[in-house]
Amino acid sequence: MNRLEKGHMSRRERQIMDILYRLGQASAKEVLEAMPDPPSYSAVRALMATLEGKGMVTHSKESRRYIYKPAIAEKRARRSAMMNLLSTFFDGRPEKLVAALLDPKDMQLDEKEIEKIRNALEDQSPSDA
């Protein structure tokens, strides 16, 4: 299990992975341009090399530039992050997470958002066949 799956990543590593998942693949320059408050170009290249060394990204060469891609499927990474969140803050109990999301002191959901949640729950529930 790598750092992404364990949920142990620096802020910059998470930013880069988010960008790569959003774009599918990118050069260091493209990642730099997509980063909020970006570091230097050399720092981005060093971070990309570090991420590759940790098995989190892979690269291919297109002419003179490296193109980076996530080495782990986004769905798998998302699930791992969710499991880490659940175990860290909610005793591993999904109902505690949902209750926190629905707590009116923290967040007010409009009818459209509530309907989306209902639809998602219905899509996930086993059919009564």
Image (spheres, rainbow, N blue to C red):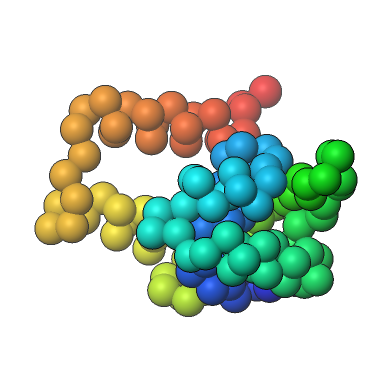
Return the x and y of residue 39 as percentages of the image width and height.
48, 65
Q: Is residue 69 above or below residue 86?
A: above
Name the one closer to the observer, 20 or 5.
20
Quarter in which the N terminus is drawn: bottom right
Q: Is residue 113 above or below residue 74?
A: above
Quadrant of residue 71 within the rendered picture: bottom right
Name the one closer to the observer, 60 or 117.
60
Q: Is residue 58 above or below residue 33?
A: below
Quarter in which the C terminus is drawn: top right
Return the x and y of residue 7 as percentages of the image width and height.
59, 70
Left or right, residue 124 beside residue 114 = right
**Residue at point 62% right, 66% down?**
42
Quadrant of residue 24 within the rendered picture: top right
**Residue at point 62% right, 28% down?**
127
Whether residue 43 can be seen here: yes
**Residue at point 58% right, 60% down?**
41
Q: Residue furthest front?
A: 64
Q: How many marks?
A: 0
Return the x and y of residue 76 as percentages of the image width and height.
70, 52
Left or right, residue 56 beside residue 7 = right
Left or right, residue 84 beside residue 65 = left
Q: Is residue 74 above or below residue 123?
A: below
Whether residue 14 can be seen here: no
Return the x and y of residue 13 as percentages of the image width and height.
58, 65
